[in-house]
Image (cartoon, helix red, strand yellow):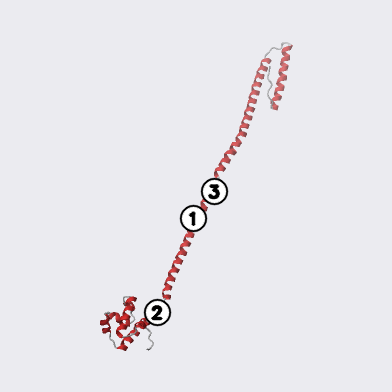
Amino acid sequence: MTEIEDFGSYLKAERELRGVPLDEISTTTRINIRFLMALENNQFDDLPGEVFIKGYIRSISKVIGSDENEMLSTYAEMRNKTSPKPKDINPKVEINNSIDKSFIFRLGLIILFLVGIGWGVSILVKQLTSNIKPLEPAIDEFDQSQIKKLPDSTTETKDDLNSSKKLIEQSSALNEKAKIKNELEQLPDNLPKKSIQSTENLSVIEDSESKSTVQGDMPLKLV
């Protein structure tokens, strides 16, 4: 038997070798002639399924008088040669995997980017709040500094009051002395010695009080 590349050609050669027409096989096996022609033309996609194909091969081999096991093994061998290899399917799977990996990678980058933005915003907010908080202590320090200065101004006010009081007292004393002096000057000249001595004592008192006024001391009081 010559080498045959596909199972359909092999099946047709075996049938023609024994001189059995397709109509006879279809009538005997009750297989639709369309399916028999599909087998010989290698149109396996037009057939119901793998289980039915193997059943058709067994029935055909019995009608044409061929070895059933040999025909099934030939079908399996040639079917493996002509059927798509798993490598043809793997590239699609690899492409899908690569697409999934790239999508996951991009999604991860987007998530990292969003996390980075959130982290940056949180740091900015912390910096702004930290810059605002020190304003309150500054105001407190300002108030305290102003409060500390109050005792000094109070002391100065007291000193001013004391000085004013001294000046008033000195002015009152001087007015009183001037009044007494005027009264003494209006007295007659023929006063006794005792009165003249009192007048001289008054002059001495006036001189001492004027000196004490220049030096900033308290004025002397008359008795």
Q: Amino acid at mark 2?
A: Asn
Circle nearer the viewer, 2 or 3: 2
Q: Earlier in the sequence, mark 1 or mark 2?
A: 2
Residue 68 occupies quadrant = bottom left
Observer-nearest of 204 and 3? 3
Q: Residues within 10 Å of mark 2 (few under 14, many from 20)?
A: few
Residue 178 occupies quadrant = top right
Q: Residue at x 42, y 71 (%)?
A: 93
Q: Name the secondary structure under disc 3.
A: helix
Residue 70 occupies quadrant = bottom left
Residue 159 location, x and y as percent? 64, 30
Residue marked by disc 1 = 118
Q: Name the secondary structure under disc 1.
A: helix
Observer-nearest of 220 and 34? 34
Residue marked by disc 3 = 130
Q: Residue at x 47, y 62 (%)?
A: 108
Examine the rendered structure and indicate whether residue 49 appears above or below residue 138: below
Compared across the picture, whether 128 is left or right of 207 comes to left
Q: Amino acid at mark 1?
A: Gly
Q: Earlier in the sequence, mark 2 or mark 3?
A: 2
Q: Earlier in the sequence, mark 3 or mark 1?
A: 1
- The image's mark for residue 80 is 2
Observer-nearest of 133 and 39? 39
- Tell me the CA gap for discs 1 and 2: 59 Å
Compared across the picture, whether 167 is left or right of 10 comes to right
Examine the rendered structure and indicate whether residue 79 appears above or below residue 2: above
Q: Residue at x 52, y 48 (%)?
A: 129
Q: How many marks?
A: 3
